[in-house]
């Protein structure tokens, strides 16, 4: 397969937007094209993450409309990818594979989503559509509920008092808000305290409000190209060094919810392709839809032993200056979670970090970064390993 | 073309009749519910209908306090390991959600069901959730 490089990235501010999904995407895509010194007419394909555009704005088949908005030629196929919250990462991976395989030389991938327009009840209902419609939905399960069950199981399995686990989880939220306060594109740009997390309203026991990421609007975009033709196009190309994606059935079939089997399979493939191990990673953007989700992801990606991620978070190992900085962008928790755009925004952050352009949240000397995105209740996981060229 | 081994309609009708319908794999002996296209353990296609023992153990749970439309919080969702091996999701009933703590994990339950009749103006079939009651 051919080497693939990222030439440029773009991202809107996450939060509540008055722009439509298409308008947000245009902003992100044109920024990525500007960074790349290219125009839409140069692109050969568009790979779009978008999950609930039909419920949000009544829009199906959004990809070709987005392609037209940014000037892709009619000969360039535009395709929507849906893997719940991992949609954009899956889109980026498929875009990179098309370039690696020689089908295209230059493509744009990304995502756009406008979740906030739905309001909390409809958003909670539509997000829950990621659970098994026949055999899980009727129990009234929600995404916070699934991760709440993970937290209870984590405490029970590892013999950790729930109060202690919740303090570790709160520290994840505090850390991600600290980072988000240093990210001008983050949905929430203010620091919070452990006490504030632990005094919030309960959403799904034991998860309180500030254990949960928000519903956000936003878009992000990435220009990918064949290295042999386009490496000299920009000053700081970033190499797509490894990729993985894995799939699992409903949570009832996964049993031990502290071990996400799709993640373990996906990241193993990505590390193998990149020729690295978790100890080589300098910075990571991972799927912290809930505080406990960051803890189990930090274990599943190999940064900490299983059962040790909670205390590592409390110790500060994942802070900007820690052993393995996690979610310097603020993560889904503070940066926000426009589900169909999230994976591309994670790529945006890692690219900025590897170029040394992350400002006050820069991880010093970062050369290798990992993206981790989870879709549905542990049924889709997609991982990327990016390397400074 | 072989029929789907145990379709949702027949699964729900079995629940209504007081059974816990599932499948048994003739190749590896695995017994499982809810239904799947092939054996959840070995991908074998030689499946026969099998009712499962409606008893199990709570492995984890949560109390839903912000619910999807159509549900009335607070209520308990639990993941239960059945005596026959598979895990199922359902609602713990007859227990005050505000008293739910980690000591629920490991408690034995019996399994029942609650039916959600389909709206008259829609096609499809009724929905069903499993329910759990503490049995110790």
Image (cartoon, grey):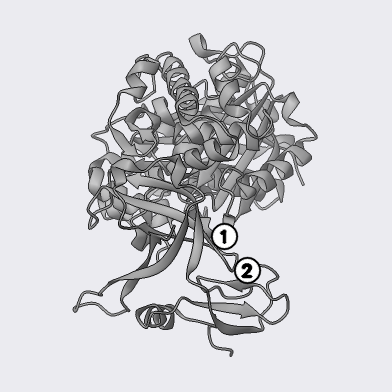
Q: Which residue is at 58% across, 34% downward?
A: A159
Residue B113 lies, with reference to residue A371, above or below; the image says below
Residue A133 lies, with reference to residue A275, above or below; the image says below
Image quarter of the C terminus of chain B? bottom left
> How far from the left and from the top, in percent, is residue A226?
69, 39
Residue B106 lies, with reference to residue B129, above or below; the image says above
Disc number at residue A339? none
Tags 1 and 2 touching, CB below 8 Å: yes
Other-residue count near label 2 (Cα within 10 Å), few / some / many at <14 / 14–19 / ≥20: some
Residue beneath disc 1: A253
Q: Are marks 1 and 2 on the same chain?
A: no
Tell me the subunit letter for badge 1.
Answer: A
> How far from the left and from the top, in percent, is residue B8?
43, 77
In depth, the one of B18 and A108 nearer the eye is B18
Q: Is residue A24 left or right of residue A302?
A: left
Disc 1 element:
helix
Q: Is residue A253 visible?
A: yes
> How far from the left and from the top, in percent, is residue B124?
32, 79
Residue beneath disc 2: B40
Q: Which residue is at 53% across, 32% downward?
A: A294
Other-residue count near label 1 (Cα within 10 Å), few / some / many at <14 / 14–19 / ≥20: some
Tell me the subunit letter for badge 2.
Answer: B
Q: Which residue reaches farthest left?
A: B121
Q: Which residue is at 26% across, 47% downward?
A: B74
């Amino acid at each position: 397969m051919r080497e693939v490089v990222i030439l440029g990235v773009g991202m809107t501010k996450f939060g509540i937007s008055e722009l439509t999904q298409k308008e947000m995407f245009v902003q992100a895509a044109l920024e990525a094209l500007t960074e790349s010194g290219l125009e839409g007419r140069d692109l050969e394909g568009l790979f779009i993450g978008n999950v609930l555009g039909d419920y949000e704005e009544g829009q199906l088949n959004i990809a070709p409309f987005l392609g037209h908005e940014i000037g892709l030629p009619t000969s360039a196929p535009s395709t929507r990818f849906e893997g719940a919250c991992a949609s954009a990462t899956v889109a980026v991976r498929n875009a990179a594979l098309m370039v690696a395989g020689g089908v295209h030389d230059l493509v744009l991938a990304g995502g756009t989503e406008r979740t906030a327009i739905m309001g909390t009840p409809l958003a909670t209902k539509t997000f829950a559509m990621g659970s098994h419609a026949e055999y899980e939905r009727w129990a009234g399960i929600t995404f916070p509920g699934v991760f709440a069950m993970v937290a209870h199981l984590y405490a029970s399995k590892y013999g950790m008092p729930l109060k202690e686990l919740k303090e570790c989880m709160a520290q994840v939220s505090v850390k991600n808000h600290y980072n988000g306060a240093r990210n001008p594109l983050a949905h929430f740009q203010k620091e919070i305290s452990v006490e504030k997390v632990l005094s919030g309203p309960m959403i799904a026991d034991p998860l309180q409000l500030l254990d949960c990421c928000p519903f956000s609007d936003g878009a992000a975009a990435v220009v990918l190209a064949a290295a042999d033709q386009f490496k000299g196009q920009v000053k700081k190309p970033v190499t797509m060094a490894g990729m993985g994606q894995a799939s699992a059935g409903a949570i009832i079939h996964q049993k031990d919810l502290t071990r996400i089997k799709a993640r373990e399979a996906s990241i193993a493939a990505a590390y193998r392709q990149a020729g690295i191990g978790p100890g080589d990673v300098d910075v990571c953007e991972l799927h912290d839809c809930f505080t406990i989700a960051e803890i189990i992801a930090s274990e599943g990606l190999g940064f900490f032993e299983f059962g040790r991620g909670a205390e590592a978070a409390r110790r500060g190992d994942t802070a900007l200056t820690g052993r393995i900085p996690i979610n310097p962008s603020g993560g889904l928790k503070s940066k926000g979670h426009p589900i169909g755009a999230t994976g591309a925004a994670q790529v945006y952050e890692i690219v900025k970090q590897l170029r040394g352009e992350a400002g006050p949240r820069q991880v010093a000397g970062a050369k290798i970064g990992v993206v981790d995105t989870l879709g549905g209740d542990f049924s889709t996981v997609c991982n990327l390993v990016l390397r400074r060229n | 073309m072989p029929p789907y081994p145990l379709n949702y309609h027949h699964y729900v009708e079995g629940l209504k009749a007081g059974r816990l319908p599932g499948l048994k794999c003739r190749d590896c002996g695995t017994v499982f519910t809810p239904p799947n296209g092939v054996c959840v353990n070995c991908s074998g296609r030689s499946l026969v209908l099998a009712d499962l023992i409606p008893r199990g153990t709570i492995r984890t749970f949560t109390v839903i306090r912000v619910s999807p439309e159509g549900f009335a919080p607070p209520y308990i969702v639990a993941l239960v390991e059945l005596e026959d091996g598979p895990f199922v999701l359902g609602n713990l009933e007859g227990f005050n959600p505000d008293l739910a703590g980690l000591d629920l994990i490991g408690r034995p339950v019996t399994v029942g069901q609650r039916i959600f009749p389909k709206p008259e103006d829609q096609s499809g079939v009724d929905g069903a959730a499993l329910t759990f009651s503490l049995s110790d």
